[in-house]
Image: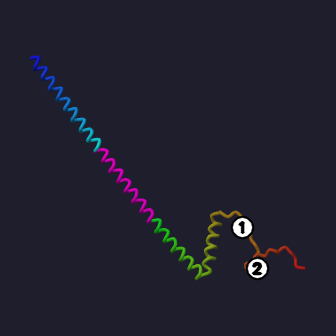
Amino acid sequence: MCTVALLLSVVLFNVSVIISQIVKVQVASYNVEIQELNGEAEFKRAEQNKKILIEQARAERDAASLRAEAIEIVGAAAQQYPEYRLQEFLGAFGSALTDQSIDKIIFVPTEANIPITEAGRTVK
């Protein structure tokens, strides 16, 4: 009876050691799989960020190109229609007055668009 109990305890000990080894191996392989999945997720995140930066750069390039075309069109209109610049100035001036971003208006007397600097002097 004693040998059977001893044999049974040895068998149970060996089985528990084997089970613990199996659990250790499974945990180790699980950790490796988790690290691998984390690495893949980080790689995909970096790839997506790269695509976003590329698309932003393309959008900025396209916007710059369209802005240059608009400047070219406005410049051509200003050359072709000289009154266009005056209209743009008056529009901007009117907007500034409406927004109250102009505090003072100083009127300078001119003659043929040249300021009269000696308006206070008398002719002798």
Label 2 SS = strand
Judge whether 106 appears above or below 41 on screen: below
Which residue lies under the disc numbered 2? 111
Q: Which mark is residue 105?
A: 1
Q: Residue at x 33, y 47 (%)?
A: 38
Provide residue 41's location: percent of width, then percent of height: 34, 50
Locate residue 23 relative to residue 117 in the image: left or right: left
**Reading the chain from its start, which is encountered first: label 1 or label 2?**
1
How many residues crowd mark 2 within 10 Å: few (<14), some (14–19), many (20+)? few
Q: Residue at x 40, y 58 (%)?
A: 50
How many residues crowd mark 1 within 10 Å: few (<14), some (14–19), many (20+)? few
Closest to the observer: 100 or 124? 124
Report the magenta residues as a range.
33-58
Q: Quadrant of the C terminus?
A: bottom right
Closest to the observer: 86 or 37? 37
Amino acid type at image mark 1: Ile
Q: Nearer the viewer, mark 1 or mark 2?
A: 2
